[in-house]
Image: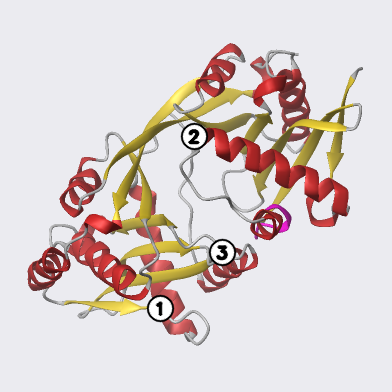
Amino acid sequence: MPITIEELPLAKLAAAELNDAVGLLRRLDQERVPEDPITPDEVYARQITASPPDGRLFFWAAREGGALLGGAYLQLSDRENLQLGFCGVLVRPEARRRGIGRQLLRHTADRAAAEGRTLLAGQTSDRVPSGAAFAAAMGATAGLEMHTNQLDLRKVKPSEVARWIEESRAKAAGYRLVWIDWENADDATIAQVAQSYEAINDMPKGEIALEAEHWDVRKTRERHTFFATMGFEVWTAIATHDETGTGVGFTEINLTPQVPEIVQQQGTAVAPAHRGHAIGLWLKAAMLERLVRERPRARFIRTGNAKVNEAMLRINTELGFRPAWSTTFWQAEIAKLPK
């Protein structure tokens, strides 16, 4: 039977289409992290159908005789990185090496080009080697090597966490740690969060053509609303500077209530002018203490770090994080992709 490629509106998927998309994502997650608990259908469904703020999300389905063999997505920002599209090509293991991924990538590239983009970027995991092989075969360039580091929360010693908090807080004299109550925070507090988010712009980007991403109150609130729509509970702690009142650093995690065992670190960063005061360690240790205390069912917390980000790797290593797998960000010029 011939392979058909169809673009589908994610926000308006029919029940059968949504069920197929959930099945595809679950199959690929089980390949990549077979040790993880099974994610419920409703969790996948919320994540698939949530519309990103300040951007658009496109999806293509590859079918054979009605069976969904693969899919591709394209996310475009309408605010920043207007030259770049973020994409993923997903093919069931049993359907690979049949040209399905190549067809899906072509549809993705054509749409990105029609929207004025010149570059595509995507990510692969060393747990699924076929992803890197496909990216290389399509002419993409490996632009940034990353580690996914993982902390087994059963091995965390409360006395060590307390020591980290005490020692780092002493070094961070002149700064304050603030927990964000997203439902009740006023605009002045959210402005401090936005200032803190700016610190992530200093992260290593390798050869990926990422522009700095700038934050204001509206965009910061919309980001949280987007995560909430996807079903995440977001915990955010920021560091503020006593003298100026500005936000100078943050750490943030996402929790999925239906899968309490796995916690995803969304980011940690400190503004360059305020480094050297152990603020990053203070933020992460305080988050760890709260997580262990309030969420006893949590088993692993995971964070992504560029291999060249020595400062953050050093903090994570001190806290007990260890490498779980590696990922690579790839970039390709759309004009040079295979037709």
Which circle, 2 or 3, is nearer the viewer? Answer: 3
Tell me if residue 235 can be seen. yes
Which circle, 3 or 1, is nearer the viewer? Answer: 3
Q: In the rendered structure, does residue 50 fall within the stretch colored magenta? A: yes
Q: Residue at x 91, y 26 (%)?
A: 65
- Dominant secondary structure (helix, strand or loop) of the stretch shown in magenta: loop
Q: Residue at x 39, y 50 (%)?
A: 201
In-image side of 168 versus 92 (left or right): left
First to last magenta residue range? 48-53
- How far is mark 3 from mark 1, CA to CA? 23 Å
Q: Nearer the viewer, residue 209 or 161?
A: 161
In-image side of 182 versus 180 (left or right): right
In the picture, which quadrant includes the C terminus? top right
Q: Is residue 37 above or below residue 339?
A: below
Q: Identify the element where label 1 is drawn.
A: loop
Q: In the rendered structure, does residue 8 fall within the stretch colored magenta? A: no
Displayed quadrant of residue 114? top right
According to the picture, the residue beneath numbered tag 3 turns out to be: 258
According to the picture, the residue beneath numbered tag 1 turns out to be: 180
Residue 162 rendering spot, x and y as whole percentages: 13, 71
Q: Are marks 2 and 3 in contact (CB under 8 Å)?
A: no
For the residue carrying disc 2, how many other residues have a C-alpha within 10 Å: few (<14), some (14-19), or many (20+)?
A: some
